[in-house]
Image: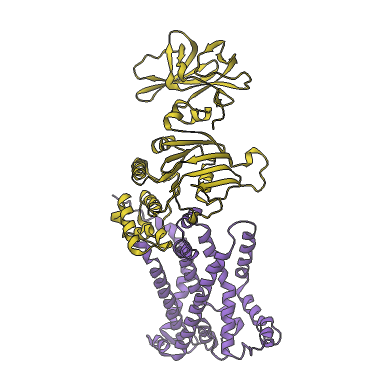
């Protein structure tokens, strides 16, 4: 086990990348602590699978280094990196039994049969596969097959990290939760470093201690689920995480303060003076109706159980509010109040006043 | 559940039934008819019972032809299937060479069978054929029209040349349908190339290989045109396969009864062996 560091890593699938769009992965520096549970979150095509394949060694980066502890493993093939990977679609060796599937990585490494037997029964117990050990792997359901894939990773004692590439895609919804809890449990038991790629925020936020949010080949923010929710460093993060996402409203900047349709808005941060595009970011949770303040036109109310989601128009921009069930909702013209300590100015998409942070 | 009985549906089956009747059932019944009767010409027939079947099954001529047939079929299967798989494994999976390889592979399959026979006939001639002349020049005493061993060698080479492509194309189709994740997982599991072949590629090719083996079995058991053009069954009877022998009896000697009985036995053998092949090869999947 070791700490995994990525240093000035860049990747392009093209031989001669010329402009920004040619890079599948833009330059990034990252450290993954030993034993952590990480999630790589981002929309499809943002480069998360590319990053994962670079860590596991299935892909060689165009630039930069991958370090496991202090060792440079950039040029090493996957089998020498001691990495386990679970793929989107379950990979099992059809003709083998569940037992042989789990034993396969050990046998390939020349481990003696006695040790193989011990490890396999230990891992089978951990992944609830004990009763199926004698069965042909091809007969299992999708979640059983994913457990085998996971088990093949866990069975090795020399594993540096287990990588998951959207492992729950083909799993039935009611089993997803179970399998995710299983992963959490295994993480706590084995203390393996786990990196989990997904485009589903629920999966990422419930699984990981730290979430890496990516967008168009770039890491936009790394943080705990709370940090991502409370202080998004980028409007993308604010919008991508949370349901509904953060409201992003274009505004003017006057002397470092945000001005919305002529009214000055209190925010928790200040903008620099030379700003091209400024926006106010505030989550629907932190907006409430008030007697006076900014004027909005209420357009739609949707019932979301314990909350009502209110759609409104603020100075020509659509915004959403979360109103607790039972509170009165004004119709047509109303006034709203933004919670000042949760309202932030974003300059060119990034949180204003945040220097040098990823 | 109540099923509606609607006899009108039979009318829709009728056209197919008529077609099948005229191109399969009626000719087959004619053969059955001949196989149990004796004729001296002029369309006069006498009941012969199962005499012809007994004769055929006891005749050493039939046994020899069957032996040669089995030897031919299993030899070409033993060569074409492994060779086809090896070539398919060696073929590129991406890039412009894929189409080039596929077209090259498909070429032999496009050539009419009698042309294949004629090509190899000339190719193997000791005085003027490229193969025959070359072999003789480098010191082999090769003459497929005189020596049975050479005739067999040429016959098998010809079939391998003509039909290995079929196995290649089917095996290749099986190979390219394997998702990348399997190879990636195998790499991570530290599998050797042999293990990848044994546990990923071969199992995934199983279905197409079953079809390939069945097709090659049936076709090679029925083969007539190519050996007929190449050797005509010679020298002597050394390359007389079942179909060639059948034609000799039916059209050469006009022994309609024995020929009909032999046809039926021939047909049942192919049917039985195909069934055995298929059952054995698909047995595991049903477990």
Which residue is at a point 46% across and 84% down the rendered structure image?
Answer: B66
Chain seen in purple: B
In the current view of this chain or complex, which residue is farthest to the front? A70
Residue B57: x, y in percent? 41, 87
| Residue A157 vertical position relative to residue B80 in the rendered view, above or below | above
| Residue A118 vertical position relative to residue B44 in the rendered view, above or below | above
Question: Is A299 placed left or right of A134 in the picture?
Answer: right
Question: Is A174 placed left or right of B73 in the picture?
Answer: left
Give the quadrant of the C terminus of chain A: top right
Instruction: Name the one closer to the observer, B106 or B181.
Output: B181
* Residue B7 lies in quadrant: bottom left
Which residue is at a point 43% across and 33% down the rendered structure image?
Answer: A224
Is residue A205 visible in the rendered structure shown here? yes
Which residue is at a point 52% across and 36% down the rendered structure image?
Answer: A214
Chain seen in yellow: A
Question: Is A17 placed left or right of B9 in the picture?
Answer: right
Which residue is at a point 57% across and 76% down the rendered structure image?
Answer: B159
Residue A57: x, y in percent? 52, 51
């Amino acid at each position: 086990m070791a700490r995994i560091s990525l240093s000035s890593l860049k990747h392009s699938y093209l031989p001669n990348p010329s402009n920004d769009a040619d890079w599948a992965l833009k330059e990034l520096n990252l450290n993954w602590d030993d034993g952590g549970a990480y999630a790589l979150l981002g929309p499809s095509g943002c480069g998360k699978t590319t990053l994962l394949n670079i860590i596991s060694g299935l892909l060689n980066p165009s630039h930069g280094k991958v370090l496991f502890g202090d060792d440079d493993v950039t040029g090493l093939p996957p089998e020498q990196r001691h990495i386990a990977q679970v793929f989107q679609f379950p990979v099992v060796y059809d003709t083998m039994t569940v037992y042989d599937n789990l034993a396969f990585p050990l046998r390939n490494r020349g481990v003696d049969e006695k040790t193989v037997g011990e490890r396999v029964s230990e891992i089978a117990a951990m992944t609830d596969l004990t009763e199926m050990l004698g069965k042909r792997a091809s007969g299992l359901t999708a979640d059983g097959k994913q457990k085998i894939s996971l088990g093949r990773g866990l069975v090795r004692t020399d594993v540096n990290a287990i990588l998951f590439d959207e492992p729950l895609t083909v799993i039935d919804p009611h089993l997803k939760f179970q399998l995710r809890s299983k992963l959490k449990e295994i993480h706590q038991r084995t203390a393996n470093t786990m990196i989990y790629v997904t485009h589903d925020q629920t999966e990422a936020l419930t699984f990981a201690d730290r979430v890496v949010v990516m967008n168009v080949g770039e890491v936009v923010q790394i943080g705990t689920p709370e940090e991502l929710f409370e202080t998004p460093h980028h409007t993308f993060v604010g919008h991508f995480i949370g349901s509904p996402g953060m409201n992003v409203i274009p505004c003017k900047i006057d002397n470092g303060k945000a001005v919305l349709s002529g009214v000055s808005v209190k925010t928790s941060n200040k903008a620099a003076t030379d700003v091209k595009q400024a926006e106010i970011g505030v989550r629907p949770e932190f907006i409430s109706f008030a007697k006076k303040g900014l004027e909005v036109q209420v357009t739609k109310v949707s019932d979301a159980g314990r909350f009502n989601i209110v759609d409104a128009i603020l100075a020509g921009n659509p915004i959403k509010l979360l109103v607790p069930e039972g509170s009165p909702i004004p119709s047509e013209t109303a006034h709203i109040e933004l919670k000042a300590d949760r309202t932030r100015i974003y300059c060119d998409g990034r949180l204003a006043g945040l220097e040098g942070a990823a | 559940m109540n099923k509606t009985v609607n006899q009108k549906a039979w009318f829709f089956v009728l056209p197919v039934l008529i077609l099948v009747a005229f191109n399969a059932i009626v000719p087959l019944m004619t053969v059955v008819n001949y196989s149990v009767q004796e004729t001296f010409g002029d369309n006069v027939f006498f009941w012969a019972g199962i005499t012809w079947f007994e004769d055929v099954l006891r005749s050493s001529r039939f046994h020899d032809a069957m032996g040669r047939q089995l030897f031919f079929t299993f030899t070409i299967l033993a060569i074409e299937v492994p060779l086809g798989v090896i070539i398919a494994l060696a073929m590129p999976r991406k890039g412009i060479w894929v189409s080039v390889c596929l077209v090259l592979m498909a070429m032999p399959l496009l050539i009419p069978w009698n042309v294949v026979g004629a090509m190899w006939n000339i190719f193997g001639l000791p005085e003027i054929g490229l193969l025959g002349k070359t072999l003789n020049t480098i010191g082999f005493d090769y003459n497929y029209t005189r020596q049975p061993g050479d005739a067999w060698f040429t016959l098998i080479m010809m079939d391998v040349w003509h039909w290995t492509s079929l196995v290649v194309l089917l095996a290749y189709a099986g190979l390219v349908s394997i998702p990348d994740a399997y190879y990636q997982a195998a790499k991570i599991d530290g599998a050797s190339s042999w293990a990848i072949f044994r546990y990923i590629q071969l199992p995934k090719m199983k279905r197409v290989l079953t079809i390939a083996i069945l097709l090659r079995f049936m076709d090679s058991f029925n083969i007539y045109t190519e050996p007929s053009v190449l050797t005509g069954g010679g020298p002597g009877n050394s390359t007389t396969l079942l179909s060639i022998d059948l034609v000799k009896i039916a059209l050469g000697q006009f022994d309609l009864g024995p020929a009909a009985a032999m046809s039926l036995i021939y047909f049942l053998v192919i049917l039985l062996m195909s069934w055995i092949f298929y059952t054995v090869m698909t047995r595991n999947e049903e477990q």
